[in-house]
Image (spheres, grey):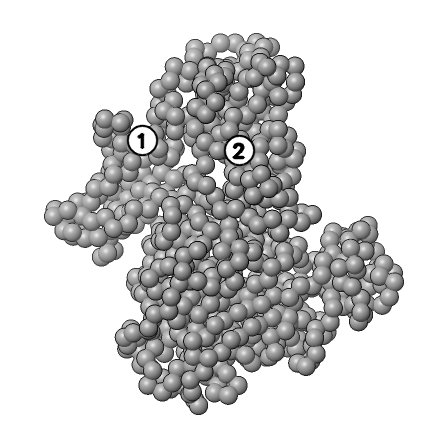
Amino acid sequence: MVGGHRAALGGAAAHGRRAQQLRGARALVLALVFCLALGALPGLAPLPAAADEAPPTSILVSLTPEFGAIPEGITDLLGEPAAVVPLGPAGLYRVDLPAGTDPDAAAARLAAAPGVRYAEPDRTFVAPLSPAGLLANGDTLGDWGLRRIGALDAWRMTDGAPVTVAVLDTGVSPDHPDLIGRVLPGWNFVDGNADTRDDAGHGTFVAGIIAGRADGGAPGVAPGARILPVKILNRDAVGSTANFVAGIVYAVDQGARVINISADGIMDSQALFDALRYAEERGVVVVASAGNEPNGRWNYPAAVPTVLAVGASTPDDQVASFSSYGAFVDLIAPGVDVTSTWWSPEGGNGYLTAGGTSASAPFVSGAAALVLAVRPDLSPAGVRQILLESAHATGPDGIDAFSGYGRLDAGLAVRMAISAAYAAEGQVSGVDDVDGPRLRFTAEGFAPGEAATVWLTPQDGARRVWRGVAADASGTLTVDLGPRHLLPEGTWTVTAVGESGTRVSATYILHPEPIHPAFVPIPAFESQPDRVYFPETGHSLAYGFKRYWEERGGLAAFGFPISEEFSERDPVTGIVHTVQYFERARFEYHPELAGTPFEVSLGRVGVEVAPQAFPTAPAEVASEARRYFPETEHTLSGLFLERWAAGGGLAVFGFPISEPFEAGGKLVQYFERARFEVSPLAGSAADVQLGRLGVDLARKLGYLR
């Protein structure tokens, strides 16, 4: 694993900041561990836990209307009385069990009953922070994190107003000098009232990173944003999943556009997933800390695909040594020697320098607020796409288990979010090369030598970014976009933005050109029972391939044929197969298996087209809802598992070779013979589509240019 290190904070803070004294300041090293607390929604009778007692043993139960009377039905199933408290999502309840009741056994008993969607123990989470020490009199505050993520560049365009960011935490100190006027009325799920003042410090620290005053002691990433405090942790840091569920729903209903969760646990939760889906459907971005234990375990809610999972980075763009890792990590942000607002029972309001992924997540939440400030129309998937694709790669190419897409770049993210309609016009042109044609982007109007960032935005897929390019002495910027056959098909836009704000854009339409004879369209003919002609692509489909295509999903699954049948040699085995390419697949004919269901099979297009070897998953994440495949060390769950099983499973699609991840605004998962794609808002396995791997592979092999 990449190691992290501590670095001294240096220099006076920007914008005329001055170091401020902390009341009763004294050097102190703290190790804080926070857990979730139990609570109830506003308007419901709260069930507060006393500070000196453990929270009650509880389970979460989701019921359908067919279940019957509540709480009588639950009491009958358990065989003993239990307190039943409704939570935010319709049909979800917290059941507080009598002392001595086994929550796992009780959940299993309820889950088997008619009218019960699911039942699960009410698990606890932790929110770790590793402070380096309270700032003593005369200490100087540092802002390396803001500079590293390009916040000052983003502030030229927006300060995050009027976006609201919900902080699900220990509360927030509303009278902190850096937060006064920025903290909205919220809700306290610990005591069931509106008093959301911080009684531990963690929430104030997080809120300052997000929205601390620009001219204060510790500016935030989005100083114009507003903070919605949602207190889910009591003064002794005791809590549960129930508060997260209720807190998420409350934040969404109160108009938050971003939710920050600087806490984690190792247990998956259907109730938590339902609450997160509630947020996704209503346009709310959720950001969570990845965790502070580098043991390869998946931490929740960060590991939910629609949540931005944030690890910690160091001042030199390395992954901090304590940062959790795994296929669920999306990106990293400053998490070592971070200075922010603080509150303590001994000293009241002040400042703290600390480390942990609890500090990293609010950097990303603040950046999400900046993006939404300039593009309030963006969906959560659209915001995530921009933040991930603008991230600065710090590790190997592609997605890695330690840094995900890379380190947060808020400045570039905001520039990407701003509409290209305000740009001057550039040009994309072809250039002949010994290895085939390439495409080049040319843009004028820059200052001589002006540095710029360039990105390509395809109609369907992930952006590509070129950093560190510069205009020549005449102010002309020229960028080699790469070989034509490796660039995305369809309509795409190239945009360049210079340091001074100069913006130039060009749109290009790339139609693949057939090179191999089998891909050249054939003359049209009238379709026959054994051979069908498709005018959409100018190709036909016949006999065994036609039968397989029709029986396994046809157009919806595989798309149109893009070639005729031809002979192709397998580069690994050397065996020659009769094959045919489709938009989303390659069919192979196996005469040795004639008369069996495997006479026709899908080629290993997923393996051949996958852009990288993907981070694997630990075996312990397996559950009833998540199938683990030791052959490839990957998992399959949810809609992708349903689609995989319904479409033929292992025989058709092969093993998964990646975990689900977001790319181009879609959830994506690679298999040996396919790529599944679906909208994060999809509700049925029927919505899962196969990616256009047939076209991708044909272009990669040079059949199409």
Q: Report the amino acid beneath label 1.
A: Arg
Q: Which mark is residue 672?
A: 2
Pick whichever, 471 or 79, lies toward us.
Answer: 79
Residue on which the image places disc 1: 484
Q: Disc 2 on helix, strand or loop? A: loop
Note whether 416 is above or below 602 in the view shown.
below
Q: Where 247 sits versus 420, above or below?
A: below
Quadrant in which residue 72 is drawn: bottom right
- Residue 515 x/y as whole percent: 35, 19
Task: Judge whether residue 440 can be spotted in this image.
Answer: yes
Q: Quadrant of the C terminus?
A: top left
Q: In the orientation shown, which residue stands out farthest toward the bottom?
A: 24
- What residue do we see at 60% from left, 53% from top? 277
80 and 461: which one is in front? Answer: 80
Q: Looking at the image, is mark 2 or mark 1 nearer the viewer?
A: 2
The number of discs equals 2
Q: CA distance from mark 2 to mark 1?
A: 26 Å
Residue 141: percent from left, percent from top:
34, 77
Pick the residue in front: 228 or 645.
645
Q: Residue at x 53, y 22 (%)?
A: 587
Q: Quadrant of the N terminus?
A: bottom left
Badge 2: few (under 14), some or many (20 or more) residues near its Cα, within 10 Å? many
Amino acid tagged 2: Glu
